[in-house]
Image (tube, rainbow, N blue to C red):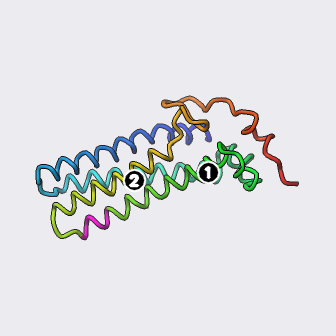
Amino acid sequence: MYALVKNAHSGLRWLMLAGVIFVVVNAARAMSSSRAYTPQDARLSLITMVVADLQLTLGLVLYTALSPLMTQSILPNFGAAMKDRVLRFWAVEHITMMVLSIVVIHVVRVMVKKADTDAVRHKRTMYGFALALAMVWAGMPWPWKPYGRPLMGGDAPAPSASTAPSAVPSGR
């Protein structure tokens, strides 16, 4: 079950990232051409939001129940995990950036619905989704980072001595 959810979460990140980028580019092009805000614009941001929500749901399942890194290494001794940059990334930084990005997406969608003009709708969409994009980008486990994951499928590199579950003191 863990591998299935982790692989779905890993693969869905690309769909979410592509959706957010597409929304930003679409809104920027609409702003530059003074195009009307259409139902297709609203649908595009809605679909992206739904993908983001699904991604969050899978991530929360991993975080709270399925990930051995979380359940065996981080959560049993959270204080010690905060002293290790790799464990801290997974325990706090990743989830914080992703949850905040999805909150931004939801808030932007509400703000767009309340906007008076098409220009304001496109502007709010572009800037809001760009902020969400920056947060997603910052919170992703890029392969070149110490906590990185492969770009496509596969598993994370073997943990270093400092990130192995036995290296985190149990606090007992």
Residue at horizontal 22 percent and vertical 49 percent from the top:
28
Dot 1: element:
helix
Measuring from the top left, give residue 64's x and y in whole percent: 64, 54
Residue 157's label in the rendered image is none
Q: Quadrant of residue 148?
A: top right
Q: Position of residue 168 (x, y in %)?
A: 78, 45
Confirm whether the magenta stretch covers residue 78: no
Of mark 1 and mark 2, the one earlier in the sequence is 1
Within 10 Å of disc 1 (Cα), the crowding (few <14, some 14-19, many 20+) is some
Q: In this figure, what is the number of numbered marks?
A: 2
Quarter of the image holding residue 19?
top left
x 50%, y 47%: residue: 139
Give the extent of the magenta segment: 109-114
Compared with residue 11, is residue 97 higher up or lower down, i.e. above or below?
A: below
Is residue 112 rendered magenta in the image? yes
Side of 148 relative to 112 (left or right): right
In the image, taking residue 86 as reference, residue 7 lies left or right, namely: left
Mark 1 belongs to which amino acid? Tyr
Q: Nearer the viewer, residue 107 or 66?
A: 107
**CA distance for labels 1 and 2:** 21 Å
Q: Which mark is residue 63?
A: 1
User: Is 17 on the left or on the right of 23, as rendered?
Assistant: right
For image coordinates 56% across by 40% down, the residue present is: 6
Secondary structure, mark 2, is helix
Residue visible at 74% across and 38% down? 162
Q: Is residue 12 above or below residue 121?
A: above
Badge 2 density bin: few <14, some 14–19, many ≥20, Cα 10 Å: many
Specify the amino acid type for callout 2. Ala
- Using the image, tell me which numbered label, if any, was put on residue 132: 2
Name the mark nearer the viewer: 1 or 2.
2
**Secondary structure predominantly adopted by residues drawn in magenta:** helix
